[in-house]
Amino acid sequence: KAVLGPGLGRAVNAPTEQNETQNEAPPDQILDRVQFLINNLSISNCAEKANDLRDILERRYFPWLGNYLVVKRISTQPNFHTMYLCFIDSLGEYGKGLVDAIIASVYVNVGKLLRSQKITTSTSERSLLKNLGSWLGQITLARNRPILQIMLDCKELLFQGYETGMLIAVTPFVAKILEGAKNSTVFRPPNPWLMGLMGVFRALYNVDDLKMNIKFEVEVLCKNLNLKLEDIPLRNADLSKRIPPIKEKNPDFNLKSQSAAAPAAALSPDKTSSSGASTGGDSAKSDDEPQQTVIPNLAAYVQVNPNLTQLFEQVQGGPLSTHITLDLLKRSVPI
């Protein structure tokens, strides 16, 4: 049975308990000042707030600050990623250690989410993972900084996501990482590392019954990288070597179209005509006759205006002789 994890790198397989215990927090007074500073951060005052942070926080607290930014800000506020990047750039030489601490925290939290039992069912967890992928691409690939295979093997992650029914979470995550390459001078197409991953994406795109939202992620990525899907080299040979997934009850695949085709075939003209021969007069009805839906107990919800009696007398020239009964009402009001 296929499992997610082996060979994916330290981000997924390394234990996280030790990393969490190393994040020494500053004293409460400094902690409150730093959080107040981050709360009042904007794109227009990044340089000012960066100078304030230099005066407030020692470098030995960067692991704590990096984890705080990733967990409380970056993973939940994708619209402010540009602002946080501007703030980090404004820190200059002082902030280099903070960049490393942030990237390390991203890998730790990516591993937590990928190992989560709810990642395929929880939209909130998948949203966090997607946001972390977007940030990881911006702080690494967009700045010509590689994502080392020893830390996170993106290609193997796609293959194992295919085998284990986790493409619904893995595809948006890796796609958001690669979006950072559009602003890179090193990793933009036709970079071999990038094109190898795009080949895997195209092979997955062509898998039968793959859900449209997963295919949409691939299409958006191709558009952002200015690539045409049909121009990407296929990696079908690599995909054929993987364990094929079971598509039934798999969140990556949509089999409703096939299941809906079976009842439709059962109601084909040949079968309806043969079944009609054994059921008597009801079978004489044409297949083209529109079906009517009768609402039970409809008379309880309908009130007949008594003025209609006068209307019928005017039209027919005599008293109203037809009484509206319950059965007539049911037959004459199709929905």
Image (cartoon, helix red, strand yellow):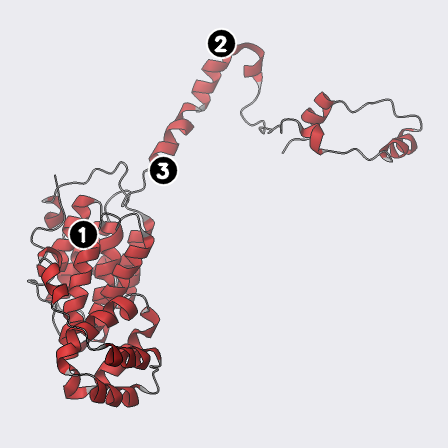
- Asked whether the residues under the numbered discs 3 and 1 touch, taking CB atoms below 8 Å apart as contact, a structural biologist would say no
Tag 3 secondary structure: helix
Q: In which quarter of the image is residue 128?
A: bottom left
N-terminal label among 3 and 1: 1
In the rendered structure, the answer to whether residue 95 lies left or right of residue 284 reads left
Q: In the displayed structure, would residue 212 be above or below residue 324?
A: below
Q: Position of residue 328 (x, y in %)?
A: 72, 23
Task: Report if residue 264 is visible in the image.
Answer: yes
Residue visible at 29% across and 52% down in the picture: 214
Amino acid at circle 2: Ser
**Residue at the spot of label 2:** 278
Residue visible at 16% across and 60% down in the picture: 197
**Residue at the spot of label 1:** 115
Instruction: Kindly report which numbered mark, 1 or 2, lies closer to the viewer in this rendering.
Output: 1
Tag 1 secondary structure: helix
Residue visible at 12% across and 79% down in the picture: 60
Amino acid at circle 3: Ser
Residue extending farthest to the front is 28
Amino acid at circle 1: Arg
Residue count near mark 3 (Cα–Cα under 10 Å), binned few <14, some 14–19, many ≥20: few
N-terminal label among 2 and 3: 3
Mark 3 and mark 1: span between their CA atoms? 31 Å
Q: Where is residue 251 in the image (x, y as percent from the top left)?
A: 28, 44
Q: Which mark is residue 257?
A: 3
